[in-house]
Structure formats: C-alpha cells, structure tokens
Amino acid sequence: MLCDHQVVTDHLIDYIDGKLSPVMRKQVEDAMAECPSCKEAYLNAVALTQTAARWQDQPVPEWHRTEYAVRPRQQTSSWLNWTSLAASAMAILMVVFQVNISTSENGLQIAFGSQANVDAIVERKLAEYKQQQDTLLDARFVAAADKQDTARKLMMADMLDKTREERRDDLNFIVTGIQTQRFEDQAKLDKELLSLAQNQIENNQYISQLIQSANYSEGDK
Amino acid sequence: MFQLRKDEKLIEKALGGSQSSWVSLVKRYEGLVYNYCYRMTFNNSDAMDLMQEVYLAVYRNLPAYRGDGKFKSWMMRIAANKTTDFLRSRGRNPLHQAGDVLDDEFHTHDSPHSDYEEYAENKQIMKVLATLSEEHRMVVELKFFQHFTFEEISQQTGVAVSTLKTRLYAALQKLKGHMEVQNVV
Ligand SMILES: [Zn+2]
C-alpha cells in the first residue's frame, strides 16, 4: 500500500505528545512501520525536540525600550470621552481652530484659540460636521460609546499628534482660505473639508485601529 | 493565570501612560522575542533590529489589543508578520545573501569566553535551521522552540492548520541528514 503520509502529517505532533487515542496511535505506528518517509519524519521530530531543548537563551543586548514610546498627553478634562471626537474631521477642525473643548456644569464648552471673527460660523460647522461624522461612524462606534477605555484615549492623543504633523500644510491652506474668503465660497470649503475628512478616514491607520478597537469592544459584549 | 492577569494589568497601565509598566512588559518577553528573532535571522544585529521593529509595532497596536487572549500569542503574531517582512526586505538586500549570515557571527559577538562556549551549541542548532526555507523555519520555530499549538500558529501566521502540518512534515523531511549529527551528541 502506497503511503500518502497524511496520517503522520496530521497526527505526528499529537503522537509525540502522547495525546492520541489508542486507535489513532495504532494508525500512526502502522504508517511509520510501512513508510520510511514517515518513520524518518518521526525520528527527525524527536531529534528536533531534543535539539530545541538544548538552545541556550542568549541575553538581550541593552537597548532603549521607550525611545519610540510616545506618552499620551495628560488630560485634565474629560473631553476625550466625547465619542464622536473619533471622527477625523473633528480632529482636523480642532487643529485648525485650536479648539479647546471642556466639560463643565453647563455641559460641553467649545472655545477657539483665535479666529474670533469666525466663531459663530465655525461653531455651526463643528456641529454640522459632528453630525455628519456621527452618521458615518456611529454604526461602528456606538457599541463602544459607553466604554471609555484608556486605549481610545491614547489613540486619540496619537491621532491628534499625527494629524497635526501630517496635515499642517493642508490645514494652513484651509485656514488661509477661511480667513481670506470669509466663507464666501461655502460650497468649495465644504467640499475641501469633507474630502480632507474622508481622506483622513481612509488613510489614517489610527482611525482604522480605532475602528478595530471599537469592533472588538462590540464583540466582547 | 496569574501571569496572564499581570500582563493585562501592565498593558492597562502602559496605555494610561506608565512608561515603567511598558518597560516591565517589554522585559518580560524581550528574551523570548530576541532569541526568536535570532533564530530567524541568524544574526545578532538583525535580531536586534527586528526585535525593535516588533516592539514598536506592539506599542503602536497595543490600543487594539483585545485583552481576551494571551498577550504572548498576540505579540508573536506581530512578530511573525514583522519577521516575514524583514526577511523579505533583507532578501532583496545584496549585503545579506543567504549563506553569509552564519559565518563570523560568533567572532563578532562581544561576550566573554564562557559565553562563547555556551553559545557554540546554538551555532550548531542554527546550522540545522539554516537548511530550511523561511516558511519551513517559521513553523519549526513556532512548534519546536515556542511550543505553540497549530491553532495558535495558524492565528499568528494566517496559514491554515492543514497547510502548517504539511509544511512541518516537509520541513522534517528536509532535515534528512542534518539531524544525525545532532543525534550523536
Ligand atoms: Zn508516509
């Protein structure tokens, strides 16, 4: 009988570990008795087990374990608990307008570092984009809305950092546009912000991690 | 179980910004990861580079760690991915052609003489591993050195269990003639 090595391929490790039923064990032993190839696989596996056990762990050379470990920025307020902040458009807008958001007894407060002249419009914009992004992302994030874990805080901090670095040029361009055009060309600005937001959603790995994290949270329930 | 819980605690603290927790977590597994990288790259400095890449990725992905499985297994999945990428890019680098890597390795190692004696055994083992392709070496590494189950290896590598078993059988065949030297020892 010609051996296709399948029995030994499937069960060799369990055979060595003594985890097979007597019936299966017999099958493996029969295959090894008749097939030199299977017999050799077994012998090599046993030898390899012994070989691996002889490995002497080599000490790890000294290295910088925290070089790349960016610490999350200390946040005194709980603004990160705002689930919809996950929307990248919001992150961008926050960078653009240096938005400070804090919670108080009066609820959510939004303040701008400058651009006082566009406060009203921006505030409306923020609300609009929040709504838009909510619609877009709520399906994914709603499950995690009440699970404000540290993981997401770190990710938000990371994302804002990265957003700030990567999008500075884009943002400067848009800020300039806002200042000079004074929202005369609303449609164009809308389009720019939206495409920027979408671009961010598609490309930002932190966003995808965030989504992954949210999905995991959902799965945990 | 205790170990598992402690991993989770360190991860939680690290995510909260505790550098010392992160360092503790790294130190707990870096020996395992480093030796794994060493056996996969056959080279001290490559092992070091690869290990750092693995931990950078672990750090970046830590927020996405579910906490519902073994951290070690999750970490080794990242290690497997990084190793595949690393070996692939090294394969394109003419400075790192297969065959060169094992020579001189232990002469450049700046450890005391006693260490040299101790690691001479490792050199023999790596010579055996060097007869395998990267795919075969990976499954041998994860099965015989890391002692993961086929299911765990499958999760880490994204390769089906049946394929892994076939690869392992083939790897054991490839060891023909190389293991005999080991058997005598
Ligand atoms: Zn056979």
Image: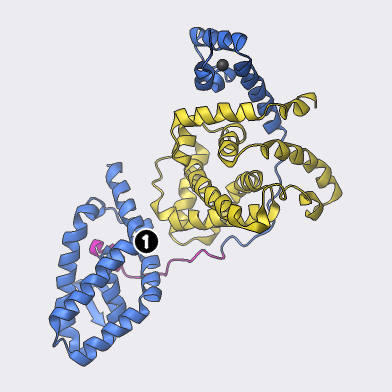
Chain colours: A blue, B yellow
Q: Is residue A106 visible?
A: no
Q: Please state, as top left, top right, bottom left or bottom right, where the C terminus of chain B lies in the image.
A: top right
Up the image or down, A31 lies above or below A221; here it is above
Check disc 1 and give the amino acid type: Tyr
Residues shaded magenta: A67-84
In the image, A178 versus A9, the foreground residue is: A9
Q: Position of residue A67 (x, y in %)?
A: 57, 65
Q: Which secondary structure, mark 1?
A: helix
Q: Quadrant of residue A78?
A: bottom left
Residue at the spot of label 1: A206
In the image, what residue occupies the spot 18% across and 87% down?
A: A118
Up the image or down, A178 lies above or below B183; here it is below
Up the image or down, A108 lies above or below B40; here it is below
Q: Is residue B29 magenta?
A: no
In the image, B49 versus A85, the foreground residue is: B49
Q: Position of residue A213 (x, y in %)?
A: 34, 52
Main secondary structure type of the part rendered in magenta:
loop
In the image, A1 versus B10, the foreground residue is: A1
Q: How many C-alpha atoms fall within 10 Å of the one at disc 1: few (<14), some, or many (≥20)?
A: many
Which chain is home to disc 1?
Answer: A
Left/right of residue A29 with respect to residue A53 in the rendered view? left
Left/right of residue A73 with respect to residue A118 in the rendered view? right
